[in-house]
């Protein structure tokens, strides 16, 4: 049985393929159970449910939420959480996600305004509304500083992402929507869903590695500050090593948490269905 519970599309967020193309690829790869988990968006869900039925694939509703996690005494870090099996018709959930998407666009505009202030000092032509539209088009309406960095490279203003951040994007940053873990948990649970900590030890992504790379210390943090808000942990991920996966499986068993897994596929390249996720994961959703 092939399982992938962490896939993105360009229909809802920052994937490279539409939801229709994702399902075509999933069928080719003989995926049996899957979930589209677009960032802060449920726009692809109804279509995904329909396509899953057409292709004979078992489907679970999904979404990925970015949370501002407050780590005592004063550290604030960005973490991702996956919502599953929620009611896509829940109005409060849809309204909140819409608010978050609007904030993301406002944030992008504010970052560009700050960039233009810096450009003026260097006699560099400022970004216009047309530039903003080009960035939007390139990332299918999901904004983030890495996307703006790519555009800075494309325009020849910087050589690489590191220079983009060092020279401009750190000083020109604007805070993300301040979604707390408690609020994210309420959003999903009140829509009859479950909340899962995504890629907790991802070395290249939003994860607890920004606090510590020690697996035992990571799970101590989860035990102390997250257990009341989460229902599961993503134990299989495309950037996990075997040690990380086994550590989190043991941790989940200890606390009776759901275990999930997924490639986190944005189709850059296509990773769907490449992880060896055991069938027992599917049994938790029956």
Image: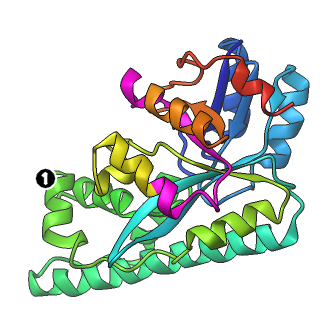
The image quarter containing residue 279 is top right
Question: In the image, 284: left or right of 251?
Answer: right
Compared with residue 17, is residue 228 higher up or lower down, i.e. above or below? Answer: below
* Residue 189 image-quadrant placement: bottom right
Query: Magenta residues?
Result: 222-245
* Residue at image coords 60%, 46%: 10
Front residue of 20 and 243: 243
Above or below 117: residue 19: above
Q: Which of 55 and 66 is in front in this view?
A: 66
Residue 40 seen anywhere in this rendered image of the structure:
yes
Residue at x-position 64% and y-position 55%: 230
Name the quarter where the N terminus is drawn: top right
Residue labelled with disc 1: 159
Q: Residue furthest left?
A: 122
Indicate the position of residue 248 as horizontal and vertical percent values.
Answer: 49, 35
- Asked where in the image residue 175 lies, by quadrant, the reply is bottom left
Q: What element carries label 1?
A: loop
7 sits left or right of 243 in the view: right
Q: In this view, does 116 lie above or below 147?
A: below
């Amino acid at each position: 049985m092939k399982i992938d519970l962490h896939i993105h599309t360009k229909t809802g967020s920052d994937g490279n393929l539409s939801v229709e193309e994702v399902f075509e690829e999933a069928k080719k790869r003989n995926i049996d159970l899957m979930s589209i988990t677009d960032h802060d968006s449920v726009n692809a869900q109804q279509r995904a449910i329909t396509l899953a039925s057409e292709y004979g694939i078992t489907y679970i509703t999904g979404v990925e939420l970015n949370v501002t996690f407050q780590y005592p005494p004063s550290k604030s870090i960005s973490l991702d959480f996956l919502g599953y099996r929620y009611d896509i018709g829940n109005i409060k959930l849809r309204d909140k996600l819409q608010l978050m998407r609007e904030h993301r666009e406002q944030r992008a505009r504010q970052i560009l305004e700050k960039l233009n202030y810096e450009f003026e000092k260097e006699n560099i032509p400022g970004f216009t509304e047309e530039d903003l539209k080009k960035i939007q088009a390139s990332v299918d309406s999901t904004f983030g500083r890495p996307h703006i960095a790519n555009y800075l490279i494309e325009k020849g203003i910087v050589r690489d992402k590191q220079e983009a951040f060092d020279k401009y994007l750190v000083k020109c940053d604007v805070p993300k929507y301040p979604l707390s873990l408690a609020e994210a948990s309420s959003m999903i649970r009140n829509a009859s869903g479950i909340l899962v900590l995504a890629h907790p030890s991802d070395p290249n992504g939003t994860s607890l590695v920004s606090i510590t790379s020690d697996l035992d210390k990571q799970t101590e943090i989860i035990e102390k500050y997250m257990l009341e808000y989460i229902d599961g942990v993503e134990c299989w991920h495309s950037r996990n090593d075997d040690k990380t996966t086994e550590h989190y499986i043991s941790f989940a068993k200890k606390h009776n948490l759901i275990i999930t897994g997924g490639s986190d596929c944005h189709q850059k390249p296509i990773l769907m269905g490449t992880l060896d996720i055991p069938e027992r994961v599917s049994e938790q959703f029956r």
